[in-house]
Image (cartoon, helix red, strand yellow):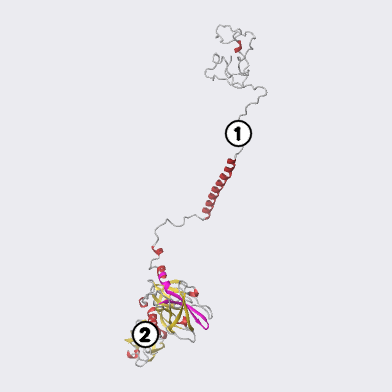
């Protein structure tokens, strides 16, 4: 028998069974031949399988003499697979290929869109982030890691925010009815029993009926206690429990550059706070409307934003103390146009405003401080000064030895250049105050002390 064949290969024998002897082949009778091993099986073993072989219905994968085959390769497998014989009319059992594509199930149909959506979202997010980074949005992480709140953000009582929070409940909007309509300005509570300080020009021309609006929006009626046109101070009274009066500072202790806040209702915008500095001190002012009284005061100049409606409101220092009463502004406008802030605002020093307020509350009118002399105007000579045109007999100036024709150079070190300076600066001081006057008589410079007095009005 020859070597075993692979499944499906031709297994035709070299000689047909029973065809007789062939040189080099064992005899068909099964007898022995010298040099050849005796076959353990009969002729049926050659060329055709034994009963039950692969060509029969119950064929076996094993040949009966497979292990005794002298030509067999010892390393070859002992099993020989031969194709089976399919019986007529019998269909082979279907075999399913596990690698063949199958019909999708409902689970597969649901998973496909979910996975697709996740992939699309991931891709879209990645592309959006890439475009955002390229376009600059999101390129930097804004802010740092959370840390302790900085001191400036804690709104300590001495901060500007702390000062504003403390003073605002004491600031009011003042509304006064007049024949021409309603005048509106600002004011602040000066006493716990309801006295409010404002400007005279806020209540001037009123019918006596007034009201105030507090910072919480509540309102209360008020009456006019008294007013002084020349100092531009007025006092009104409101009846309301739980009022918080302001804390007063010392306007004489101010220095140029000190921080200040202006609080009020500019252009009817209540509870407005603006900040600035003291720009100048003793800026002598002569103000008033045509045909009205002339107002004199040595003002505090500030660059805090002050507009119409701020009149009568407080000017507050860095400690929250009132140091002035906002009164007037300068603006570059043509006649008939609305004036606005350009950084030049002026406030009446609180030391002067307090004195006038106490006079009004106590007597209904204010005293005016006078020196008992009138200046004619600038001398026009080197060194400046104001030449005295009149000296009242037995007045303060006369009592200090000043005479007509003397040139007033300085009062308490403040140079005199305009007639307004003498009147405004003198009214800064209270009656009975002693001031040093430097003057020139002829070619001689001299100093004298003048005790100021209240006028007889």
Q: Nearer the viewer, mark 1 or mark 2?
A: 1
For the residue pair 169 and 345, the one nearer the viewer reads as 169
First along the sequence among labels 1 and 2: 1
Q: Position of residue 417 (x, y in %)?
A: 40, 84
User: In the drawing, does residue 113 fall left or right of residue 368?
Assistant: right
Task: Using the numbered discs, state the Cα–Cα distance from disc 1 to disc 2 in whole angstroms.
Answer: 117 Å
The magenta span reads 165-189
Q: Name the residue located 53 percent from the left edge and 50 percent from the top edge.
A: 125
Identify which residue, 400 or 217, lies in the foreground: 217
Magenta segment: does it hold 185? Answer: yes
Q: Residue at left 53%, top 54%?
A: 132
Q: At numbered mark 1, what does the secondary structure look like: helix, strand or loop?
A: loop
Residue 440's spot in the image, x, y percent? Answer: 35, 87
**Frontmost residue, 185 versus 378:** 185
Task: Report whether residue 416 is seen.
Answer: no
Specify the quadrant that holds the N terminus. top right
Looking at the image, the residue that sits furthest to the right is 89
| Percent position of residue 437, x then y | 34, 85
Q: Is residue 192 magenta?
A: no
Task: Please tell me how crowded label 1 is: few (under 14), some (14-19), or many (20+) other residues with Cα within 10 Å.
Answer: few
Placement of 73 over or under 272, stated as above or below? above
Quarter residue 408 falls in: bottom left
Residue that mark 1 sits on: 100
- Locate the C terminus by quadrant: bottom left
Q: Is residue 138 above or below residue 327?
A: above
What kind of secondary structure does the magenta stretch mostly adopt?
strand
Q: Which residue is mark 2?
A: 409
The answer to whether residue 345 is above or below residue 443 is above
């Amino acid at each position: 028998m020859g070597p075993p064949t692979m499944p499906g290969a031709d297994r035709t024998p070299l000689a047909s069974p029973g065809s007789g002897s062939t040189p080099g082949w064992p005899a068909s009778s099964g007898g022995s031949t010298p040099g050849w091993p005796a076959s353990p099986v009969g002729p049926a073993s050659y060329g055709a399988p034994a009963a039950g072989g692969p060509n029969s219905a119950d064929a076996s994968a094993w040949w009966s003499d497979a292990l005794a085959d002298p030509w067999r390769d010892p390393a070859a497998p002992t099993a020989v697979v031969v194709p089976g014989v399919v019986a007529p009319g019998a269909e082979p059992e279907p075999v399913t290929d596990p690698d063949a594509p199958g019909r999708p199930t409902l689970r597969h149909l649901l998973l496909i869109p979910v996975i697709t959506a996740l992939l699309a979202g991931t891709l879209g997010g990645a592309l959006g982030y890439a475009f955002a980074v390229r376009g600059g949005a999101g390129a930097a992480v804004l802010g740092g890691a959370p840390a302790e709140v900085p001191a400036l953000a804690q709104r300590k009582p001495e901060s500007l925010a702390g000062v504003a929070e403390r003073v605002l409940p004491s600031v009011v909007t003042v509304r006064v009815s007049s024949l021409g309509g309603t005048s509106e300005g600002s004011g602040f509570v000066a006493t716990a029993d309801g006295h409010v300080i404002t400007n005279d020009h806020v209540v001037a021309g009123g019918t006596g009926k007034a009201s105030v609006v507090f910072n919480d929006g509540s309102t209360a009626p008020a009456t006019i206690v008294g007013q002084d046109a020349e100092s531009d101070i007025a006092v009104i009274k409101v009846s309301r429990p739980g009022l918080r009066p302001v804390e007063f500072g010392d306007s004489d202790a101010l220095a140029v550059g000190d921080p200040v806040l202006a609080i009020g209702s500019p252009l009817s915008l209540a509870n407005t706070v603006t900040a600035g500095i003291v720009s100048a001190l003793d800026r002598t002012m002569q103000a008033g409307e045509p045909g009205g009284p002339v107002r004199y005061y040595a003002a505090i100049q500030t660059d805090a934003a002050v507009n119409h409606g701020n009149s009568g409101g407080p000017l507050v220092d860095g400690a929250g103390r009132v140091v002035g009463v906002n009164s007037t502004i300068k603006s570059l406008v043509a006649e008939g146009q609305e004036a606005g802030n350009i950084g030049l605002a002026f406030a009446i020093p609180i030391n002067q405003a307090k004195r006038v307020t106490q006079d009004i509350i106590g007597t209904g009118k204010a005293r005016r401080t006078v020196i008992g002399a009138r200046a004619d105007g600038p001398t026009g000579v080197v060194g400046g000064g104001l030449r005295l045109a009149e000296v009242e007999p037995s007045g303060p100036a006369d009592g200090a030895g000043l005479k007509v024709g003397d040139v007033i150079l300085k009062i308490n070190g403040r140079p005199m250049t305009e007639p307004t300076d003498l009147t405004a600066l003198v009214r800064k001081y209270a009656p009975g105050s002693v001031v040093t006057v430097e003057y020139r008589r002829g070619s001689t410079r001299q100093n004298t002390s003048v005790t100021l007095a209240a006028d007889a009005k």
